[in-house]
Image: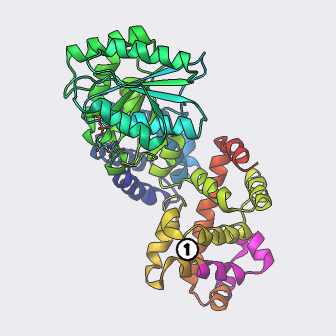
Amino acid sequence: MFESLSDRLGGVFDRLRGRGALSEADVREAMREVRVALLEADVALPVARSFVDKVTEQAVGQQVIRSVTPGQQVVKIVHDGLVEMLGSDAVDLNLDVTPPAVVMMVGLQGSGKTTTTAKIAKRLTEKGRKKVMMASLDVARPAAQEQLRVLGEQTGVATLPIVVGQQPVDIARRALQAAKLQGFDVVMLDTAGRLHVDAQLMEEMKAVARVAEPDETLLVVDALTGQDAVNVARSFSDQVELSGVVLTRMDGDARGGAALSMRAVTGRPIKFVGVGEKLDALDTFDPRRVAGRILGMGDVVSLVEKAAETMEQDAAERLAAKMSKGQFDMEDLRSQLRQMRNMGGIGALASMIPGLAKAKAAMANNGPDDRLLLRMEAMVGSMTPKERAKPDILNAKRKIRIAKGSGTTVQDVNRLLKMHQEMSTAMKKLRKMGGMKALMGLMG
Ligand code: GDP
C-alpha cells in the first residue's frame, strides 16, 4: 500500500534534501508536486488542497529556509502534516463497558463485512482474551448466516444459533440475551449489506442500533473503491453514529487515497485495515507508522517489534537504552544486521528500514540477501572500535582501508554509512515522537 505515493514523494524530497539552501520558490514548487502526488494517489481534492496549503505555510517560513538543513525540515513538516491528516493517534476499540460490549458491523454488500467480523472476533479472542459471540443479522442474502457460522467454526468463535425466518431486530435481541446469560464479553452483530446505500438499509440499521445500543459501530468499506469508499462512509455517518472505519483490501490498494482522506472527510478514525483474505490478515491502523512508511522513513517500530521476537532479552534492553539516548552506533547496526539474517533476510524487512531497499537495489548484482548482510557485517568488522563508536571520523583514507579489509568498495562503505545515518535519524525521530515508551514496553 502507498507504494506509488511513497515513490513520488521520495523523488520530491530527495531533490530538496540534496541542496544546501532553499528559496521560497523551491519550497512552493516542491509543494505543488506533493499536491499532484496526493491527487494521483486518489486523495479527495479538498483534503489534498487543505493539506498542501497548511504545510506550505509552515514550510516557507524563514526559520525553515534559513536553517542548515532546510530539506529535512520540510520533510518533517510534511510528515507531521500527514500524521495529523491520518488522525494522529491509533484508536483502539472501546470495549471497556459492563459486558457484553456490543460491536455493530455495517457496510455495503461485498465490502468484506462478514470476513472482517470474523477477523475482529478472532483477534479479540486470541489477543484480547475475550469471550466473543458473533451473530448474523443478514436475512437478505440467502447464505449470509451460514457463511458466518462457518467462519465461526474456522476461528473457534461462538455464533448465535440460526433461527430461520427471524428478523434482524429480533435476532439482535436474542443475541444480547444469549450473551448476557452465557457470560460473553463481546457480541458482534453482522448487519445486512446492500449493493447501494438505500433508505431501507438505513432504517433497518437504525432499528437494530436502537435495540442493541452498540458500544462500537464499525463501518466496513473497500479501499479499492477509492473516493467511492469515502462517499459511502460519509452517507453512513450522516445516518448512524459511527465509531470507526475498517478499510478492507488494503493489500490490493497501492494508491491509498481512501485511507488518506477518510479521517478528514468523515471525522472518524480508521481502526483496522484488512490486508488479505486470511482470517488473521487484519492490522491496526497507526497514523505515525503509516506516515513514516509513506515518507520512506521506514517502519522502525515494526522492525523493533520483529527484532524483539528473536533477540535475546538483554540485547534488546541494551539497544532500547541506547536508542532512548539517541545513540545508535556501528556496533548496534552490526547486531541489527545479524538479527536480520536470523529473521529471514532482507526481503521481509526492506520496507521497514530506511535506506535498506535502496542499498539492496544498488548492490543487487552481489548475490542473495544473506551475502549482502554478510558483506555489510564484514565492513563493520573492518572498522576499528573507535570508528564503530564514532563513524563521523571515517575519512576517505579510512574508508579505503575498510573497503580493502572487507573485500568491498568505497561506494559500498558509503552506502552502509548512509543507511546507518538514516536509521539513526529515524530512531531519534521515533524517540521525539514518544515512541520509546511503547518500545520499552514491548521489550521490557
Ligand atoms: P460482505 O458481503 O461485505 O460480508 O463481504 P465478505 O466478507 O463476504 O467478503 C467478500 C470477499 O472479499 C471475500 O472473498 C473475502 O475473502 C474478500 N475480502 C474481505 N476482506 C479482504 C481483504 O482485506 N483483502 C482481500 N484481498 N480480500 C478481502
Q: Of 301 and 213, which appears nearest the observer? A: 213
Picture coordinates of residue 431, whole percent (x, y): 68, 47
The reply to whether the magenta stretch includes residue 122 is: no
**Residue 56 can be seen, yes or no:** no
Residue 394 lies in magenta, yes or no? yes
User: Residue at coordinates 24% horizontally, 17% vertically from top-left?
Assistant: 201
Instruction: Give me the residue at 36% from left, 40% from top.
Output: 248
The x, y position of residue 44, in whole percent, is 30, 34
Which of the four quarters of the rendered structure image does ligand 1 lie in? Answer: top left
Q: Report whether 13 appears left or right of 322.
A: left
Q: Which residue is mark 1?
A: 415
The answer, for residue 9, to whether it is visible in the render is: yes
Task: Please report the residue visible at 62 percent of the width from the left and 70 percent of the height from the top.
Answer: 342
With 200 as the anchor, is 11 left or right in this view?
Answer: right
Residue 226, position in %: x, y? 27, 39
Asked if 215 appears above or below 388 in the picture, the reply is above
Q: Residues within 10 Å of mark 1 (few under 14, many from 20)?
A: many
Viewer-proximal residue, 302 or 148?
A: 148
Q: For this rendering, which residue is in front, 227 or 428?
A: 227
Residue 247 drawn at (x, y percent): 37, 37
Q: Nearer the viewer, residue 346 or 35?
A: 346
Residue range highlighted in magenta? 374-401
The way the protein has been coloured in the rendering is rainbow
Under circle 1, the secondary element is helix
Give the image quarter of residue 380. bottom right
Q: Which residue shows up at 65% across the image and 83% down it? A: 378
Q: Amino acid at mark 1?
A: Arg
116 w.r.t. 298: above or below: above
Name which quarter of the figure residue 161 lies in: top left
**Magenta stretch, main secondary structure class:** helix
